[in-house]
């Protein structure tokens, strides 16, 4: 694999797990987690998680949904959409 292919493969793998990574960041950041829990209390976890997913997709124009991953690392979600 050449340098371009290595980079392209790495980027592809990041995009696949992008949403899960955002939830992992929230989960491990004390301040973000407190804010997340406040929002879940106010609006419900489903609405909060769907909004976070939409924000992730908007932040990276051009990414497309590929499939639903039902084995997230984050405990905040039961599944997440992978992007291509």
Image (cartoon, grey):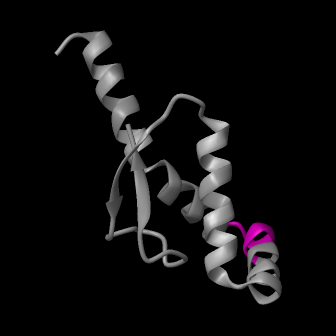
Residue 17 percent across, percent down from the top left: 42, 50
Highlighted range, magenta: 28-33
Q: Is residue 21 above or below residue 44?
A: above
**Is residue 8 shown left or right of residue 49?**
left
Q: Residue furthest left?
A: 1
Which residue appears at 31% of the width and 11% of the height? Answer: 4
Q: Residue at x 61, y 78 (%)?
A: 46
Q: Is residue 84 left or right of residue 18?
A: left
Please give the name of the residue rendered at 26% of the width and 16% of the height, measured from the top-left corner.
5
Q: Position of residue 24 (x, y in %)?
A: 55, 64
- Left or right of 31? Residue 8 is left
User: Residue 79: horizontal and vertical position, in percent?
Assistant: 41, 70
Give the quarter of the image for residue 73: bottom left
Q: Against 40, is 21 above or below?
A: above
- The quadrant in which the C terminus is found is top left
Q: Count all numbered tags in the image, as a single digit.
A: 0
Figure quadrant of the N terminus: top left
Question: Of residues 65 and 69, which is closer to you in this image?
Answer: 65
Q: Quadrant of residue 10?
A: top left
Q: Is residue 17 magenta?
A: no
Residue placed most toward the observer, 29 or 16: 16
Where residue 45 sits, quadrant-wise, is bottom right
Q: Residue at 76% across / 67% down in the picture?
A: 32
Q: Main secondary structure of the magenta part?
A: helix
- Vertical placement of 81 versus 73: above or below? above
């Amino acid at each position: 694999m050449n340098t371009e292919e290595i980079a392209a493969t790495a980027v592809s793998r990041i995009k696949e797990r992008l949403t899960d990574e955002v939830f992992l960041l929230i989960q491990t950041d004390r301040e973000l987690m407190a804010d997340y829990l406040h929002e879940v209390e106010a609006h419900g976890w489903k609405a909060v998680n769907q909004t976070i997913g939409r924000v992730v997709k908007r932040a990276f124009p051009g990414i497309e949904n590929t499939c639903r991953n039902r084995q997230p690392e984050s405990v905040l979600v039961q599944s997440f959409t992978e992007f291509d």
